[in-house]
Image: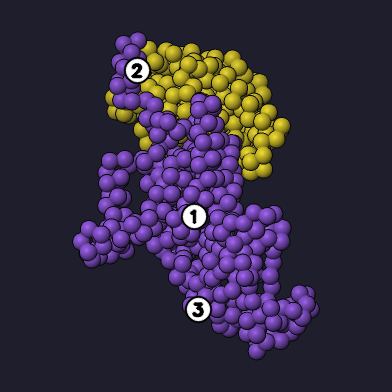
Chain colours: A purple, B yellow
Amino acid sequence: MALLTFDTAHKPRQAYTSMAVLLAVMLVFPFVAAQFGNSWVRILDMALLYIMLALGLNIVVGFAGLLDLGYIAFFAVGAYLTGLFASPQFAALLESVVNYHPELQDAIVRTFGEDVRTNGIHLSVWAIVPLAALVAALFGALLGAPTLKLRGDYLAIVTLGFGEIIRIFMNNLNDPINFTNGPQGINLIDPIRIFGVSLAGEAGSRATVYIGGFGMPSVNAYYFLFLLLCMVSIFVTSRLQHSRLGRAWVAIREDEIAAKAMGINTRNVKLLAFSMGASFGGVAGAMFAAFQGFVSPESFALTESIAVLAMVVLGGIGHIPGVVMGGVLLAALPEVLRHVVEPAQQALFGKVVIEAEVLRQLLYGLAMVLIMLNRPAGLWPSPRKEDRPAAALAKDEKEESEA
Amino acid sequence: MSEIILNIAGVNKRFGGLQALTDVGVKIAKGQIYGLIGPNGAGKTTFFNVITGLYQPDTGTFELDGKPYSPSAPHAVAKAGIARTFQNIRLFGEMSALENVMVGRHVRTRQGVFGAIFRHKAARQEEAAIRARAQELLDFVGIGQYAERTARFLSYGDQRRLEIARALATEPKLLALDEPAAGMNATEKVALRELLVKIQRAGITILLIEHDVKLMMGLCDRISVLEYGKLIAEGLPAEIQKNQAVIDAYLGGAH
């Protein structure tokens, strides 16, 4: 990591150059990757969403030190919110309401117009994104409130439970009122439309998005949107980190009692960490739903929470560049493996010996074990811990004891 | 007697079957260094924790600078104007010395999420003021040159100083120190003593728990003695030294 540094406080020039170079690479990437097939860009799209998730979780786990094993719940909240308010699903909801509360149905139809009955609600992305952030933040606070006195393992268990509760709710909230369409999931979610341009491409365009006279595949359009959102996330989380609030979070992580004694209202500050973290998950979820056009409870299993947590821990807990790297590695590498392993085996042995999925799990586990053994602070931890090698430390102590 | 800064009376605290504090109270005049001594397990730290909101008292009246305050939550007590240090040092280990003190400014500053993200003028000014004040305080306690050091890498004596600087950052009316000299050698104790006098001169009242009777006698303006959760003596250091009850408490009654 010697070449790339993002330490704007100490090496601003190098840091801004690194950022510019990286941004340039990121901007060109999809056009290069698209030469080898859209699926490569699609992998990157998903990786960017995971990076957003990892950045959000990093606020909770990395900064405030609150181990959250149910983070994917907020992703689910954002995704299902989009499913409900940007697809025909609301029509199905109304249909289910009519048997129980006809007056409620009338009220909804009166508010949103007769069209709701057949087409559901279709909010624009400008409404969906803030709404997803807000609702997820609310759920974050809801989850946070009962766990305020818990730490470490206990907190992890409770948040794990919360994550599962949300998933099971999504699975079962199709009756008596059909909010989520149950295990079948919600289909036909609107693609994102920005200033009248659909990022999925217009009908008959073969998934090509035209901006001005310039056309590009739909996955590329999403790529740029997600890249922008990731940049916003990085900007916001790093601003938060280096602020009065960020310091309060770290103080709570380091010593909660001392933080209280220093006048930090730990209840509010922790709830804020949960909410802020959750809001990133909510936005990522909304993007996911619109990108896929489909959500179902399967996408929000416990393993997903663990995967996001693994990105944070493996990359470098509490260190934003590290977390981003962890996200890229863990989200993209398995997919790359999937594309590479089987053809490689075909070429080498003439048949597939180990399936990509099996190998993926194997390597994933192996990587985690090796990294935790050799680099427990993550692949790219905060620089401070390494800036003081043991030798310099011993020297200082010697001087002090002599003084 | 001059103005009373801290007036606490009738504090009772029971842990299950153990009466940890029985009708304990102190009256501390502004600008004093006030000592609280007693044998191990006498309830000194319990009393401290009650004053600073870490433990909830069963009864008691609490007044700071003429105004009643409620020791219901530590952060509220810090806001009211009592800052404390801990017997076993509790720093924010992974943060730098400067950041530790900057955290102390939290309670006197107010920028939230909006200010953090947009860094508008008020937010930038506040942040700069926090940083400047924190550096000033580090200089004041004599570890200004270690501002960028990670707190847990500081020497023991410097960690004690850092904890005091962090407490001072909350702009306390009363600084409560729980055994600040614990584990210090003679030289460090002399330096600590100088620091405490310096803080006193800056107009901050100090409440001090300590085991080192020698240090306390020379330093404190008044002393209270606790034994088995009860006050057994209160007065000038010279009076305390001669008090038979105190001598019995420390040496055993049958000496």
Residue under pointer 3 = A184
Of residues A149 and B19, the one nearer the viewer is A149
- Pinpoint the chain carrying mark 2: A
CB contact under 8 Å: marks 2 and 1: no
Of residues A317 and A219, the one nearer the viewer is A219
- Percent across and percent down for residue A108 are 74, 78
Report the label total.
3
Position of residue A281 relative to residue B54, above or below, is below
Position of residue B212 relative to residue B117, above or below, is above
User: SS class of the residue under badge 2?
Assistant: helix
Residue under pointer 2 = A396
Q: Amino acid at mark 2?
A: Asp
Q: Amino acid at mark 1?
A: Ala
Q: Label 2: how many residues lie within 10 Å, few (<14), some (14-19) or many (20+)?
A: some
Q: Amino acid at mark 3?
A: Gln
Q: Residue at x 62, y 77 (%)?
A: A89
- Percent across and percent down for residue A394 are 30, 20
Mark with earlier residue (1, 3): 1
Q: Residue at x 43, y 49 (%)?
A: A328
Most extreme residue toward the left, as rendered? A349
What is the distance, in whole Å, between disc 2 and disc 3 at their CAs?
Answer: 64 Å
Q: Residue at x 54, y 41 (%)?
A: A23
Whether residue A292 is visible here, answered yes or no, is: yes
Mark with earlier residue (2, 3): 3
What is the distance, in whole Å, between disc 1 and disc 3 at their CAs?
Answer: 32 Å
Position of residue A321 relative to residue B17, above or below, is above
Position of residue A304 relative to residue A397, above or below, is below
- Percent across and percent down for residue A57 are 49, 51
